Image: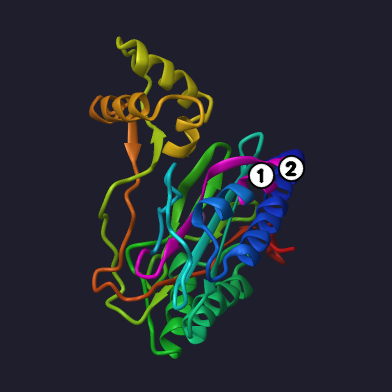
Amino acid sequence: MYSKEELDKFKKAGQIAAQARDYGASLIKIGASMLEVTEKIEAKIKELGGEFAFPPQISLNDIAAHYSAEPDDKIIFKKGDLAKLDVGVHIDGFIGDTAVTIDLGENKDLVNASREAVENAISIIKPGITLGKIGRVIQDTIQKYGFSPVKNLSGHGVGEYVFHGRPSIPNFDTGDSTILEKGQVIAIEPFATPGHGMIYESGNANIFSQINQKPVRNIITRQILQEIRTYNSLPFTTRWLTKKFNPFKVNFALRELLQKEIITSYPPLPERTHALVSQAEHTLIVDDPVIVTTKI
Ligand code: CO
Protein backbone atom coordinates (compact mmCIF):
# COMPACT_ATOMS: atom_id res chain seq x y z
CA MET A 1 0.00 0.00 0.00
CA TYR A 2 0.96 3.66 0.12
CA SER A 3 3.53 5.25 2.42
CA LYS A 4 2.62 8.21 4.61
CA GLU A 5 4.50 10.49 2.23
CA GLU A 6 2.47 9.18 -0.71
CA LEU A 7 -0.81 9.55 1.13
CA ASP A 8 0.17 13.15 1.92
CA LYS A 9 0.61 13.74 -1.82
CA PHE A 10 -2.88 12.34 -2.46
CA LYS A 11 -4.18 14.73 0.20
CA LYS A 12 -2.40 17.73 -1.26
CA ALA A 13 -3.62 16.90 -4.79
CA GLY A 14 -7.14 16.51 -3.42
CA GLN A 15 -7.01 19.87 -1.65
CA ILE A 16 -5.88 21.67 -4.79
CA ALA A 17 -8.49 19.87 -6.90
CA ALA A 18 -11.21 20.87 -4.42
CA GLN A 19 -10.12 24.53 -4.46
CA ALA A 20 -9.98 24.57 -8.26
CA ARG A 21 -13.39 22.85 -8.43
CA ASP A 22 -15.06 25.41 -6.16
CA TYR A 23 -13.33 28.30 -7.91
CA GLY A 24 -14.44 26.95 -11.30
CA ALA A 25 -17.99 26.42 -10.08
CA SER A 26 -18.13 30.08 -9.01
CA LEU A 27 -17.19 31.16 -12.57
CA ILE A 28 -19.80 29.08 -14.42
CA LYS A 29 -22.56 31.64 -14.92
CA ILE A 30 -24.97 32.59 -17.69
CA GLY A 31 -22.94 34.52 -20.30
CA ALA A 32 -19.51 33.24 -19.21
CA SER A 33 -17.24 31.57 -21.75
CA MET A 34 -16.37 27.85 -21.64
CA LEU A 35 -12.85 28.57 -22.85
CA GLU A 36 -12.14 31.37 -20.38
CA VAL A 37 -13.51 29.46 -17.39
CA THR A 38 -11.50 26.36 -18.32
CA GLU A 39 -8.28 28.33 -18.68
CA LYS A 40 -8.86 30.13 -15.38
CA ILE A 41 -9.29 26.76 -13.64
CA GLU A 42 -6.04 25.57 -15.19
CA ALA A 43 -4.24 28.72 -14.06
CA LYS A 44 -5.60 28.21 -10.52
CA ILE A 45 -4.33 24.63 -10.38
CA LYS A 46 -0.85 25.78 -11.46
CA GLU A 47 -0.89 28.71 -9.04
CA LEU A 48 -1.70 26.31 -6.18
CA GLY A 49 1.24 24.08 -7.15
CA GLY A 50 -0.67 21.22 -8.79
CA GLU A 51 -0.23 19.41 -12.08
CA PHE A 52 -3.12 18.33 -14.29
CA ALA A 53 -4.20 14.71 -13.81
CA PHE A 54 -6.48 15.31 -16.83
CA PRO A 55 -7.83 18.40 -18.60
CA PRO A 56 -10.60 20.20 -16.68
CA GLN A 57 -13.89 19.08 -18.22
CA ILE A 58 -17.13 21.02 -18.37
CA SER A 59 -19.77 18.76 -19.88
CA LEU A 60 -23.19 20.30 -20.54
CA ASN A 61 -26.73 18.96 -20.22
CA ASP A 62 -27.08 15.42 -21.66
CA ILE A 63 -23.29 15.03 -21.97
CA ALA A 64 -22.23 13.17 -18.84
CA ALA A 65 -18.48 13.64 -19.26
CA HIS A 66 -15.43 14.04 -21.52
CA TYR A 67 -15.92 17.52 -22.90
CA SER A 68 -12.94 19.83 -22.52
CA ALA A 69 -12.83 23.26 -24.18
CA GLU A 70 -11.71 23.25 -27.81
CA PRO A 71 -8.77 25.52 -28.81
CA ASP A 72 -11.27 27.95 -30.41
CA ASP A 73 -14.25 27.07 -28.21
CA LYS A 74 -17.23 29.39 -28.72
CA ILE A 75 -19.59 27.96 -26.08
CA ILE A 76 -21.21 30.55 -23.81
CA PHE A 77 -23.10 29.22 -20.79
CA LYS A 78 -26.80 29.91 -21.11
CA LYS A 79 -29.90 29.86 -18.96
CA GLY A 80 -31.06 26.30 -18.39
CA ASP A 81 -27.62 24.70 -18.76
CA LEU A 82 -26.60 21.93 -16.41
CA ALA A 83 -22.79 21.89 -16.23
CA LYS A 84 -20.68 19.06 -14.81
CA LEU A 85 -17.25 20.35 -13.81
CA ASP A 86 -14.71 17.55 -13.33
CA VAL A 87 -11.22 18.47 -12.11
CA GLY A 88 -8.18 16.24 -11.76
CA VAL A 89 -4.92 17.26 -10.09
CA HIS A 90 -1.79 15.33 -9.31
CA ILE A 91 1.26 15.83 -7.13
CA ASP A 92 4.15 13.64 -8.38
CA GLY A 93 1.53 11.37 -9.96
CA PHE A 94 -0.75 11.05 -6.91
CA ILE A 95 -4.23 12.07 -7.97
CA GLY A 96 -7.22 13.99 -6.63
CA ASP A 97 -10.35 13.70 -8.81
CA THR A 98 -13.50 15.66 -7.99
CA ALA A 99 -16.64 16.90 -9.71
CA VAL A 100 -19.64 19.08 -9.05
CA THR A 101 -22.75 20.04 -11.03
CA ILE A 102 -23.67 23.68 -11.58
CA ASP A 103 -27.34 24.34 -12.27
CA LEU A 104 -28.10 27.35 -14.48
CA GLY A 105 -31.71 26.24 -14.77
CA GLU A 106 -34.20 24.63 -12.44
CA ASN A 107 -32.79 21.21 -11.78
CA LYS A 108 -32.14 21.40 -8.07
CA ASP A 109 -33.41 17.87 -7.35
CA LEU A 110 -31.23 16.36 -10.05
CA VAL A 111 -28.16 18.10 -8.63
CA ASN A 112 -29.07 17.05 -5.10
CA ALA A 113 -29.61 13.43 -6.15
CA SER A 114 -26.01 12.87 -7.29
CA ARG A 115 -24.56 14.97 -4.47
CA GLU A 116 -26.51 13.10 -1.81
CA ALA A 117 -25.59 9.80 -3.47
CA VAL A 118 -21.86 10.48 -3.13
CA GLU A 119 -22.34 11.67 0.46
CA ASN A 120 -24.37 8.61 1.43
CA ALA A 121 -21.81 6.32 -0.20
CA ILE A 122 -18.98 8.00 1.71
CA SER A 123 -20.90 7.64 4.98
CA ILE A 124 -20.90 3.82 4.71
CA ILE A 125 -17.39 3.33 3.32
CA LYS A 126 -14.87 1.69 5.62
CA PRO A 127 -12.43 -1.20 5.25
CA GLY A 128 -14.38 -4.39 4.48
CA ILE A 129 -17.37 -2.80 2.71
CA THR A 130 -18.41 -4.54 -0.52
CA LEU A 131 -18.64 -2.72 -3.84
CA GLY A 132 -22.21 -3.99 -4.26
CA LYS A 133 -23.28 -2.23 -1.04
CA ILE A 134 -21.81 1.06 -2.24
CA GLY A 135 -23.68 0.68 -5.52
CA ARG A 136 -26.88 -0.10 -3.62
CA VAL A 137 -26.68 3.11 -1.56
CA ILE A 138 -26.00 5.21 -4.66
CA GLN A 139 -28.87 3.61 -6.55
CA ASP A 140 -31.32 3.94 -3.63
CA THR A 141 -30.47 7.61 -3.09
CA ILE A 142 -30.88 8.55 -6.74
CA GLN A 143 -34.08 6.52 -7.16
CA LYS A 144 -35.57 8.14 -4.06
CA TYR A 145 -35.55 11.38 -6.08
CA GLY A 146 -37.27 9.61 -8.98
CA PHE A 147 -34.14 9.50 -11.16
CA SER A 148 -31.87 6.73 -12.45
CA PRO A 149 -28.16 6.25 -11.87
CA VAL A 150 -26.08 6.04 -15.05
CA LYS A 151 -25.19 2.36 -15.02
CA ASN A 152 -22.33 2.29 -17.48
CA LEU A 153 -20.26 4.92 -15.71
CA SER A 154 -18.55 4.10 -12.44
CA GLY A 155 -16.23 5.21 -9.72
CA HIS A 156 -12.69 3.89 -9.81
CA GLY A 157 -9.42 3.38 -8.03
CA VAL A 158 -6.74 6.03 -8.44
CA GLY A 159 -3.01 5.45 -8.14
CA GLU A 160 0.36 6.84 -9.05
CA TYR A 161 -0.17 8.14 -12.60
CA VAL A 162 -3.27 5.92 -12.78
CA PHE A 163 -6.41 7.98 -13.22
CA HIS A 164 -8.92 5.16 -13.76
CA GLY A 165 -7.67 2.06 -11.99
CA ARG A 166 -9.17 -0.89 -10.20
CA PRO A 167 -11.53 -1.47 -8.65
CA SER A 168 -14.43 -0.18 -10.71
CA ILE A 169 -17.06 1.09 -8.26
CA PRO A 170 -20.61 0.61 -9.53
CA ASN A 171 -23.34 3.24 -9.35
CA PHE A 172 -25.98 0.55 -8.84
CA ASP A 173 -26.24 -2.73 -6.98
CA THR A 174 -24.29 -5.25 -9.03
CA GLY A 175 -24.05 -7.67 -6.10
CA ASP A 176 -20.26 -7.37 -6.38
CA SER A 177 -18.80 -8.92 -3.21
CA THR A 178 -15.29 -7.45 -3.72
CA ILE A 179 -14.28 -5.61 -0.55
CA LEU A 180 -12.38 -2.36 -0.08
CA GLU A 181 -9.26 -2.50 2.03
CA LYS A 182 -7.72 0.05 4.36
CA GLY A 183 -5.39 2.39 2.49
CA GLN A 184 -6.95 2.01 -0.95
CA VAL A 185 -7.54 5.31 -2.75
CA ILE A 186 -10.74 5.53 -4.78
CA ALA A 187 -13.03 8.03 -6.47
CA ILE A 188 -16.80 7.73 -6.04
CA GLU A 189 -18.71 9.38 -8.87
CA PRO A 190 -22.45 8.86 -9.23
CA PHE A 191 -24.33 10.31 -12.18
CA ALA A 192 -28.11 10.86 -12.01
CA THR A 193 -30.58 11.32 -14.86
CA PRO A 194 -34.32 11.42 -15.50
CA GLY A 195 -33.51 9.45 -18.69
CA HIS A 196 -32.70 5.82 -19.34
CA GLY A 197 -29.42 5.83 -17.41
CA MET A 198 -26.99 4.69 -20.10
CA ILE A 199 -24.39 6.74 -21.94
CA TYR A 200 -22.63 6.12 -25.26
CA GLU A 201 -19.64 7.64 -27.05
CA SER A 202 -20.46 10.29 -29.63
CA GLY A 203 -18.81 13.14 -31.48
CA ASN A 204 -15.22 14.23 -31.87
CA ALA A 205 -12.89 13.57 -28.98
CA ASN A 206 -10.58 16.29 -27.75
CA ILE A 207 -9.23 14.27 -24.82
CA PHE A 208 -6.58 11.60 -25.37
CA SER A 209 -3.96 9.62 -23.50
CA GLN A 210 -0.86 7.71 -24.49
CA ILE A 211 -1.33 3.93 -24.20
CA ASN A 212 1.68 2.53 -26.10
CA GLN A 213 5.32 3.31 -26.67
CA LYS A 214 6.17 2.85 -30.34
CA PRO A 215 8.59 4.70 -32.60
CA VAL A 216 7.18 7.04 -35.26
CA ARG A 217 8.96 8.19 -38.42
CA ASN A 218 7.19 11.37 -39.35
CA ILE A 219 9.04 14.41 -37.99
CA ILE A 220 5.87 16.34 -37.08
CA THR A 221 4.29 13.40 -35.30
CA ARG A 222 7.57 12.74 -33.53
CA GLN A 223 7.77 16.29 -32.22
CA ILE A 224 4.23 16.16 -30.90
CA LEU A 225 4.67 12.71 -29.39
CA GLN A 226 7.67 14.09 -27.52
CA GLU A 227 5.36 16.65 -25.90
CA ILE A 228 2.68 14.01 -25.21
CA ARG A 229 5.28 11.88 -23.37
CA THR A 230 5.62 14.67 -20.80
CA TYR A 231 2.02 13.94 -19.69
CA ASN A 232 3.18 10.55 -18.37
CA SER A 233 0.26 8.62 -19.88
CA LEU A 234 -2.30 10.87 -18.16
CA PRO A 235 -5.05 12.39 -20.36
CA PHE A 236 -4.37 15.59 -22.29
CA THR A 237 -6.38 17.81 -24.60
CA THR A 238 -5.86 19.19 -28.11
CA ARG A 239 -5.86 22.74 -26.74
CA TRP A 240 -2.67 22.12 -24.74
CA LEU A 241 -0.88 21.02 -27.90
CA THR A 242 -2.14 23.86 -30.11
CA LYS A 243 -0.62 26.33 -27.63
CA LYS A 244 2.80 24.99 -28.69
CA PHE A 245 2.27 23.67 -32.23
CA ASN A 246 0.41 24.64 -35.38
CA PRO A 247 -3.18 23.25 -35.20
CA PHE A 248 -2.82 21.50 -38.58
CA LYS A 249 0.28 19.69 -37.35
CA VAL A 250 -1.49 18.75 -34.12
CA ASN A 251 -4.46 17.27 -35.96
CA PHE A 252 -2.20 15.43 -38.37
CA ALA A 253 -0.15 13.96 -35.52
CA LEU A 254 -3.17 13.01 -33.40
CA ARG A 255 -4.69 11.15 -36.36
CA GLU A 256 -1.49 9.23 -36.97
CA LEU A 257 -0.99 8.43 -33.28
CA LEU A 258 -4.57 7.17 -32.99
CA GLN A 259 -4.19 5.06 -36.09
CA LYS A 260 -0.97 3.52 -34.75
CA GLU A 261 -2.69 2.95 -31.38
CA ILE A 262 -0.05 4.96 -29.57
CA ILE A 263 -2.81 7.12 -28.07
CA THR A 264 -6.48 6.49 -27.35
CA SER A 265 -9.34 8.99 -27.41
CA TYR A 266 -12.19 9.74 -25.01
CA PRO A 267 -15.18 11.05 -26.98
CA PRO A 268 -18.01 12.96 -25.28
CA LEU A 269 -20.53 10.73 -23.46
CA PRO A 270 -24.16 11.71 -24.08
CA GLU A 271 -27.04 10.01 -22.30
CA ARG A 272 -28.85 7.56 -24.60
CA THR A 273 -32.20 9.38 -24.44
CA HIS A 274 -30.51 12.83 -24.36
CA ALA A 275 -31.87 13.49 -20.90
CA LEU A 276 -29.99 15.78 -18.50
CA VAL A 277 -27.25 14.23 -16.38
CA SER A 278 -25.87 15.45 -13.03
CA GLN A 279 -22.66 14.26 -11.36
CA ALA A 280 -20.84 14.54 -8.05
CA GLU A 281 -17.43 13.10 -7.23
CA HIS A 282 -14.96 12.84 -4.38
CA THR A 283 -11.65 11.03 -4.00
CA LEU A 284 -11.04 9.29 -0.69
CA ILE A 285 -8.67 7.10 1.25
CA VAL A 286 -10.41 4.01 2.61
CA ASP A 287 -9.99 4.08 6.38
CA ASP A 288 -12.15 4.16 9.49
CA PRO A 289 -13.23 6.93 9.36
CA VAL A 290 -12.75 7.46 5.65
CA ILE A 291 -10.50 10.38 4.58
CA VAL A 292 -12.06 12.49 1.82
CA THR A 293 -9.12 14.17 0.08
CA THR A 294 -11.24 16.49 -2.08
CA LYS A 295 -13.21 18.20 0.66
CA ILE A 296 -12.24 21.70 1.66
CO1 CO B 1 -13.24 10.18 -11.71
**Residue neighbourhood size for the residue with mark 1, other residues' Cα within 10 Å, grouped as few (<14), some (14–19), many (≥20):** some
Q: Amino acid at mark 1?
A: Ala
174, 293: nearer the viewer = 293
Q: Quadrant of residue 136?
A: bottom left
**The N terminus, quarter of image:** top right
* Segment tinted magenta in the rendering: 41-63
Check mark 2 vs ligand 1: CB closer than 8 Å? yes or no.
Answer: no
Q: Quadrant of residue 145?
A: bottom left
Q: CA distance from mark 1 to mark 2?
A: 6 Å
Q: Could you tell whether 208 is left or right of 42 in the image?
A: left
Q: Is residue 44 magenta?
A: yes
Q: Which residue is mark 1?
A: 43
**The C terminus, quarter of image:** bottom right
* Residue at position x 30%, y 12% in the image: 218
Q: Amino acid at mark 2?
A: Glu
Residue 47, which numbered label? 2
Q: Position of residue 286 (x, y in %)?
A: 63, 58
SS class, disc 2: helix
SS class, disc 1: helix
Q: Quadrant of residue 92?
A: top right
Q: Position of residue 160 (x, y in %)?
A: 58, 38
Q: Are marks 1 and 2 in contact (CB under 8 Å)?
A: yes
